[in-house]
Image (cartoon, rainbow, N blue to C red):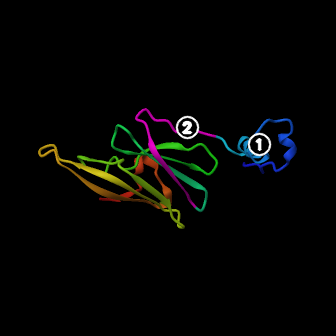
Amino acid sequence: MLSKPSTDPSVCSGKTHPSILSCLWRDMSKSIFSWEFLLRPDGNSEPELSIGPDGTTVYVALSWTQFFTNTWKGGFGQVPVFQGSIDANLANNVGGGGDADVDIGSTGTLHASTLIFFFNPQTRITQLGVSAITCPNADTSNNFSHCTGTR
C-alpha cells in the first residue's frame, strides 16, 4: 500500500540538500516507491505498461535478441509475473518486437499492437507489418491461448 508522502519540513532538518523541496522529494521517494527490475536473458528495451479499471497491470518490453515482445502481468502495486512473448506465435517466419503498445480498455480487454517482421529466406527480403492482438479480460494464461491476433 502506498503511504502518504511527508510534507513535514522537519524530516529534512540537519540535512545538506540544496533545497527543502529536493529533500522532501528524496524523503517521498523512499517512502512510496519500490523498484522491481524485470530482467530477461534476452534483454528488454522500451518498456511500457497499461493499468486496467480493476488494477490489472500489463507490461511489455522489446526483446533484444529474439524478435518478440516480452509480456508481464500483475495487480497494481504487485510484482508482475512473466507471461511470455505475446507476438511469438502469430505465424511461421514472422518475428515481432519491433515496437509495441498495450492498452487495457474499460471492459478489461487487453489490446496489444506490435511491429512485426516477415522473413523470406529465399529472397532475404523483410517486410514490415503490424499485429493487432486482443485478450478478453486481459487473460494471458496458457501462452496467450485466449488471445486472438491478426497481422
Q: Quadrant of the C terminus?
A: bottom left
Q: Does the magenta run of residues contain 39? A: yes
Cβ–Cβ under 8 Å for marks 1 and 2: no
- Could you say which quadrant of the image residue 51 lies in? bottom right
Residues in magenta? 35-52
Q: Nearer the viewer, residue 71 or 46?
A: 46
Q: Nearer the viewer, residue 9 or 101?
A: 9
In the rendered image, the vertical position of residue 2 relative to residue 132, given as above or below: above
**Residue 117 shows in this picture:** yes
Q: Position of residue 26 (x, y in %)?
A: 73, 42
Q: CA–CA distance between discs 1 and 2?
A: 25 Å
Residue at the spot of label 1: 23
- Outermost residue on the left side: it is 122
121 left or right of 1?
left
Q: Secondary structure at mark 1?
A: helix
Amino acid residing under circle 1: Cys
Q: Does the magenta run of residues contain 84? A: no
What crowding class fits label 2: few (fewer than 14 Cα within 10 Å), some (14-19), or many (20 or more)?
A: few
- Residue shown at 61% from the left, 60% from the top: 54
- Could you say which quadrant of the image residue 129 lies in? bottom left
**Residue 91 shows in this picture:** no
- Residue shown at 64% from the left, 48% from the top: 77
Q: Earlier in the sequence, mark 1 or mark 2?
A: 1
Q: Nearer the viewer, residue 113 or 45?
A: 45
- Residue shown at 77% from the left, 49% from the top: 5
Residue at the spot of label 2: 37
* Main SS class of the magenta portion in the image: loop
Query: In front of the other: label 1 or label 2?
Result: 1
- Could you say which quadrant of the image residue 64 lies in? top left
